[in-house]
Amino acid sequence: MSRFWRWVLQWGQPGELYQRLVLLQPWVAVASITMLVAGAYAAFWLAPADYQQGEVFRILYVHVPAAWLSLMIYGFMVALALLVFVWQVTVAGWALNAFAWLGAGYTLMALVTGAIWGQPTWGTWWVWDARLTSELVLLFIYLGIVLVFDALSDSKAAARMAAILTLVGSVNLPIIHYSVIWWHTLHQPPSIRGFDSSLHASMLYPLLLMALAFLLVFVWQAIWMLRCRVLQEASQTPWLARRLRGMVENGKDQ
Amino acid sequence: MRLSRVRQKRVLWALVIVLGAGLGAFMMLQALQKNVMYFYSVSELHEAPTPPQKTVRLGGVVASGSLEQGEDLAVTFAMTDYAHSIRVVYQGLLPNLFREGQGVIATGFLDKNGRFVASELLAKHDEEYMPPEVAESLQGKVTPP
């Protein structure tokens, strides 16, 4: 087996995974905070107000990154679900569980910021149009996956069930994306399609900064949750005992 | 790396699950096509008028120069999709983005005189965002579709 494949497969070993997460975490933390500060400054001070909506439009800089992330996390989860379902990678199941929680959070964030934005612009908090409804369905799918993990005490069976549910739910992703194109909706079509943007350039780059910042924050949160999970699962294994002994002797982590 | 037989079988199952769910969702949405549409366009209502007093949602653009303000927050305007247009009557608060040339969605019914009596009015907004200066310099250069 090549060195590269060995490196890839080692992500599946809890001990090795934990080491890598510990190494990765400070870099991701610094990058997230930097990007979040830069993105927020660009979005809330540098970007001009919109010609129609005025200052209200700035909620776009939270709403759109959260909505993008709610779809992207699900995309990652489909890959994890295949790892669980086909290769039965235990660690992938732990990640699936953590991602489902985080995905539910970002979906809720997209829904709530959307409602706050809708009230002053559309004149309503909520309507049952195809875009809003399919995004609400995504929230329920995320919560369903979380519930499957919580409901089954056999964690292998839970991961398999959750993986199947994730695969079934993936059907909703294209429905959310194309809802505003296939059907008449109150929600407008996407402003960014491929490399075409109907946002003015001075408003576009803060959005891209914020999107990257949100992605980094998500990775940071995922690292935290996964580290906790590894420790929880590995509390009886020799590598953790060795590691803890090392920490006591050296008086520090890492 | 080659997949073992067991894993090949599982990949197949994964495909069956996704395709099956996809087919189910597709058929359901096809059957519910009419219900998933949030509103009728003006042309659709023109071609197949709804029975009087039946409440529907109608979407279109407020035709420029057609807005008339009456007493007690009453307004009438022509809603158009640039193929057909219809007179809309509404009384109540208007959403912030309501103006001539704006897309709106009205909930109401067709009355005997062929007017659309709206009880609720929502403003759509498009996917264009730009600073006011840019919008000003574009004035008159943007043509309706």
Image (cartoon, coloured by chain):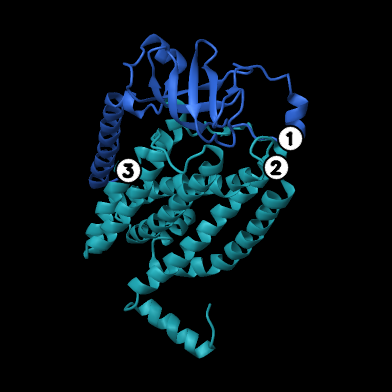
Mark 3 and mark 2 lie on one chain; the one further toward the N terminus is 2
Discs 3 and 2 carry the same chain letter: yes
Which of the image's four quarters has the C terminus of chain B? top right
Q: Looking at the rendering, which quadrant does residue B101 occupy?
A: top right
Q: Which chain is cyan?
A: A
Subunit ID for the residue under disc 1: B
Q: Residues within 10 Å of mark 2 (few under 14, many from 20)?
A: many
Which residue in the protein does label 2 denote? Answer: A49
Q: In what element is the residue under mark 1?
A: helix
Foreground residue, B118 or A184?
A: B118
Q: Colour of chain B?
A: blue
Task: State the residue at coordinates (32%, 27%).
Answer: B35
Task: State the residue at coordinates (39%, 9%).
Answer: B47
Q: Tell me whether the residue at label 2 lies in contact with that at label 1, contact meaning CB atoms closer than 8 angstroms.
A: yes
Residue type beneath disc 1: Pro
Residue B130, image x and y in percent? 69, 35
